[in-house]
Amino acid sequence: MRRTKAEAKETRQQILLAAERVFYEKGVAHASMEDVARAAGVTRGAIYWHFANRADLVLELYNSLPMPQEELIARELEAENADVFGVLERVGREWLDMLATDEHRQRILSILLRCDNTGEFAAISERQNDLDDEHMQALEAAFAKAQGQGKLGGAWTPRSAASMLRWVIKGLCAEWLLFGRRFDIASEGKDALRRLFATYGSHAPST
Amino acid sequence: MRRTKAEAKETRQQILLAAERVFYEKGVAHASMEDVARAAGVTRGAIYWHFANRADLVLELYNSLPMPQEELIARELEAENADVFGVLERVGREWLDMLATDEHRQRILSILLRCDNTGEFAAISERQNDLDDEHMQALEAAFAKAQGQGKLGGAWTPRSAASMLRWVIKGLCAEWLLFGRRFDIASEGKDALRRLFATYGSHAPST
DNA sequence: CAACATACAAACAAGGCTGTATGTTAGTTT
DNA sequence: AAACTAACATACAGCCTTGTTTGTATGTTG
């Protein structure tokens, strides 16, 4: 039953799609490889041919997500008089739009949010943490630039501004994904970003 | 080996403490009941006597956390001219302080954050979601009151203000717990709350 | 103090799942 | 076209776990 290279790629893709569905419905922990195999119309043999084990399968699921081009964004922020807030807000909006329209991303991120990230999956978590760290550094640098331009309100530090932005976006996404997506994340997220960025510029109002 | 009632309560408590440690270190999914039993110095028989199964054990772990007295807070907010922002900010600070000082709470919340909440643990997640819903309603009502007092900035609605607050606190706690607690959550949290509540009052600055 | 219930320990039964090893067929290469 | 290898299917060994059941000694109650 030797298949051609193209057919094998197709099989691999089917397995990934099946894993996405099955893991999303039953949870990573409670779905067996057999479940995934059946859903993909193959046997476990095929899965173990293409993937080392379940953790690897989940990792490849994560890797299958196209990530935003960070270098592009970085370049936009390079200019001396770059509109930092404008760029960051737009990037945030684009991320939310991407999430809102890409059901694969929704399912895969849901899977990762709900799965037990200890033991075998620690590697995946670390990977995400590393990415988070990079994002934080980039954000901090961006806000520092805004501060240099005199655009960051006095109450804020680059770090606090970056943290707040991350917490809001993470909280927004997590709640939407884990909670049945019962609101319009694109529009509510846009509003939230609007309000958040509006506060970055304002100098601390006295209370 | 029949123990007295008091000794049995003690055993139960030991099991809970052991479960907390073991689940925290190995993750709920990868720790066996035998592991917990050994750590508690009993056999699985004792655990199954006190708890129906693993999910029940985790649930009881969650239930063992003293929760903030919401009625007290609600009563504080009842007064016609209550200082809504002041109360909410203080409550938020108190919550963060409680988390910062109570290691049991840290471990148990970490366990719940990291554990796969599908299947057998769906009940626990739903429980948390229900609590979250209640909190949201209370928060919305509080911000609505502030709005009635003319204290809520024009850019905000009660719902958006409540959502933002929840996202920030959740993001803060999640990052601190999942990320090795490598910052001072009490002080950084206090700062974040300070900045956040400062923005609630200010009327939308033009950008 | 007898009868009963409690608080466990210890043994049991059964299963599901993982990883691997082997088998098989059909591309691919030379 | 022979030799080789990729792409799976199938079979297997084994393990760990869970839930339950039985045993038992000790409080507890009437």
Image (spheres, coloured by chain):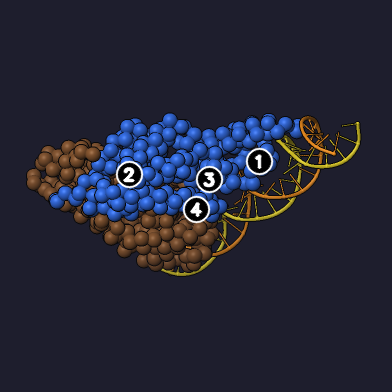
Chain colours: A brown, B blue, C yellow, D orange
Density class for disc 2 (Cα within 10 Å; few <14, some 14-19, many ≥20) is few
Q: Position of residue B125 (x, y in %)?
A: 49, 51
Q: Are marks 3 and 4 on the same chain?
A: yes
Residue D3 or B88: which is nearer the viewer? B88
**Amino acid type at mark 3:** Ala
Q: Chain of mark 2?
A: B
Chain letter belonging to callout 3: B
Of circles 2 and 4, the one toward us is 2
User: Secondary structure beneath disc 2?
Assistant: loop
Q: Secondary structure at mark 1?
A: helix
Q: Which residue is mark 2?
A: B81
Residue B154 in sight: yes
**Residue A130 lies in what quarter of the image?**
top left
In three-dimensional space, the C-alpha distance between marks 3 and 4, rounded to whole angstroms, equals: 19 Å
Q: Earlier in the sequence, mark 2 or mark 1?
A: 1
Type of the residue with mark 1: His
Callout 3 secondary element: loop
Mark positioned earlier in the residue sequence (3 or 1):
3
Query: Which tag, 3 or 4, sits closer to the chain's start?
Result: 3
Please tell me which residue lies in front, D29 or B112.
Answer: D29
Residue B29 badge: 3
| Residue that label 1 marks | B50
What is the spatial separation of the Cα atoms under label 2 and label 1, in whole angstroms? 49 Å
Q: Nearer the viewer, mark 3 or mark 2?
A: 2
- The disc label shown at residue B126, or none: 4
Query: Which is closer to the viewer, label 3 or label 1?
Result: 1
Residue B22 place in picture, x, y as percent: 54, 36
Give x and y (percent) for residue D14. 63, 46
Which numbered disc, 4 or 1, marks the residue that appears first in the sequence?
A: 1
Per the model, the C-alpha gap separating discs 3 and 1 is 20 Å
Above or below: residue A202 compared with residue A102: above
Cα gap from disc 3 to disc 2, whole angstroms: 50 Å
